[in-house]
Image (spheres, helix red, strand yellow):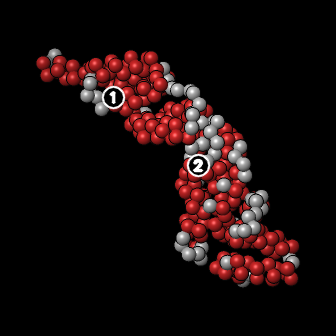
Amino acid sequence: MTMQQTVKQLDIFADSRDVMLRNDVLEQLQRRDAVSARTALEQLATGYPDDGALPAMSVLVRELERAPTAPFADHAALAIARRHLEDEVVPAARRVLPAQTGHAWLAPCWRALADRAATLAFLRADADSHSAPLWLLAGDWAAASEAAQSIESWWRIPAPLAWITEARYRAQGLDAAWPLLAELAWLAPARFAALLPVLGDASLDALRRRFDAEFPGTGEVDDDAWFPAWLLVIKPALAGRLAEARVQREQAASRATALLGEILRREHEGDQHELVSLREELSRLHAGLFDAYMATRRVLHR
């Protein structure tokens, strides 16, 4: 064996040793064994003090070691703990753990925060300082829904309505979530718009893009309140699901959705006399939506 071959083999051994030590840390992290993870981390730090993964791994090991369980004294304490998780722990997990593994590793961290926040009351002015959104991040849809439903009149408040909508979607799928999605669009169009990319549903996103392109609105976020009514124009088969939504009489977009449901029912029954007055009422609520609806009827009756 030549000197060059020997040096090359030593280089490979050296390279593989740092990989081995790094993998030892990752293995103990994934086992959530704080003591063994600290030992493995110290071995890596001793052998390779400049290793690029050390800072992130150190954050994760410390997180396993601290693991507080005492209930939060107030909302400010929760805010500090959440900020630490979001600003330090989550980036560290993304740095050294594969995406799916990282998500699973973080779930107990969010669960611990949710448990500690269980006694904190809901504050409209600081909605995210509540256990329900933490349960969503932990992937516990039932716990998230239960926590949000404990808020009085939750269906009239954008934040808990959005949380329960997401929990319903995650647990049961889009079809089950339609009524709550409609209620959220009517109550808080901006919150509805913000939820869609979080859900990441391909069919829902496609409908939203089509709505943005076709709906005769103002181009403002308040247009989203009319999304459920517009859906009935292009997907009348959803009438049954959207009929389950609680109608918000003070919202024109909500009344229009209910009205369109009634129009579709009258059409099915062939009640032409009643249809005339219902259509006139729809026209008064939103002329552009009425025109879109009538355009589909002209196509059907060509």
Query: 204 left or right of 14?
Result: right
- Above or below 46: residue 285: below
Q: Which element type, helix, strand or loop, lies under badge 1?
A: helix
Tell me which numbered mark, 2 or 1, is placed earlier along the sequence.
1
Please indicate, yes or no, whether residue 236 appears anywhere in the rendered image: no
Q: In the displayed structure, does residue 179 sit left or right of residue 94? A: right
Q: On the rendered image, what quadrant is the N terminus found in?
A: top left
- Report x, y in % for residue 264: 79, 71
Find numbered disc 2 in the image and state the secondary structure of the residue it sits on. Answer: loop
Q: Which quadrant holds the C terminus? A: bottom right
Q: Depth-wise, is mark 2 or mark 1 nearer the camera?
A: 2
Residue 154 sits above or below residue 131 on the image: below
Question: What's the mark number on residue 54?
Answer: 1
9 to the left or right of 127: left
Specify whether residue 69 is in view. yes
Residue in the image at 86% along x and 82% along y: 273
- Residue drawn at the location 79% of the way across and 78% of the way down: 278
Q: Is residue 16 above or below residue 235?
A: above
In the displayed structure, 141 sits above or below 267; it is above
Disc number for residue 127: 2
Q: Position of residue 223 (x, y in %)?
A: 59, 70
Q: Residue at 67% x, 78% y: name it.
A: 286
At label 2, which amino acid type do we have? Ala
Residue 228: quarter of image:
bottom right
